[in-house]
Image (tube, rainbow, N blue to C red):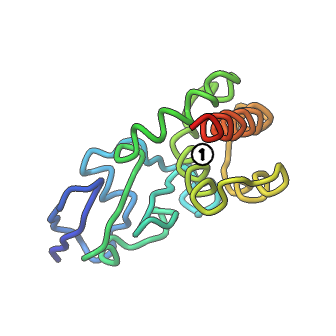
Amino acid sequence: MQITFTLNHKKVTAEIAADTVLLDLVRSLGCKSVKRGCETANCGLCTVFLDEKPVLSCSVLAARVNGHSVTTLEGLQEEAAEFGAFIADQGAEQCGFCNPGFIMNALALFRENPDPGEEEIKEYLAGNLCRCSGYEGQLRGILNFLAWKKGKEAAQ
């Protein structure tokens, strides 16, 4: 079956099998930031935005994106780099495998709630699996980013 959708702000047409999952489709189209970590929708590594809402691409049939918009980390480079620097500053990325999904979910959080508290951050990101760290570095990075962003906005 043929589908047409917008991937990272570009119109794409793809020929897919009926059982193709979105994760496999976007990876085949060059979006290597989208990772397969669990295949059970439990790790958050495959997070993408579907019509600007975070979804686990391992649990969405590719056919469902026909006529819709999909954004991966590759489509959010400027926004992701700004935030990602704060995660890196805390040494929170360690192996880096979980970073793309983590960053996608953090960006979704910031869009939904620009000023979350520590408990809200922990709750929102609870679905992200990171085997290397205890999440404290990521939490510090997020809090530092939010403080920096507030200071930046106050200076304008």
Residue drawn at x 44%, y 71% is: 60
Q: What's the residue type where badge 1 is placed?
A: Phe
Q: Residues within 10 Å of mark 1 (few under 14, many from 20)?
A: many
Q: Is residue 66 above or below residue 74?
A: below
Measured from the top left, where is residue 7 in percent x and y?
27, 58
Residue drawn at x 75%, y 31% is: 137
Residue drawn at x 30%, y 53% is: 8
Query: Which quarter of the figure is the C terminus placed in?
Result: top right
Query: Which quarter of the figure is the N terminus placed in?
Result: bottom left
Res 90 quadrant in image: top right
| View extreme (front): residue | 156
Res 62 quadrant in image: bottom left
Measured from the top left, where is residue 147 in percent x and y?
72, 37
Horizontal relation, residue 39 to residue 1: left or right: right
Viewer-closest of 116 and 35: 116
Horizontal relation, residue 3 to residue 144: left or right: left
Q: Which residue is mark 1?
A: 102
Viewer-closest of 83 and 96: 83
Horizontal relation, residue 105 to residue 91: left or right: left
Horizontal relation, residue 42 to residue 81: left or right: right
Q: Is residue 124 above or below residue 87?
A: below
Residue drawn at x 25%, y 63% is: 6
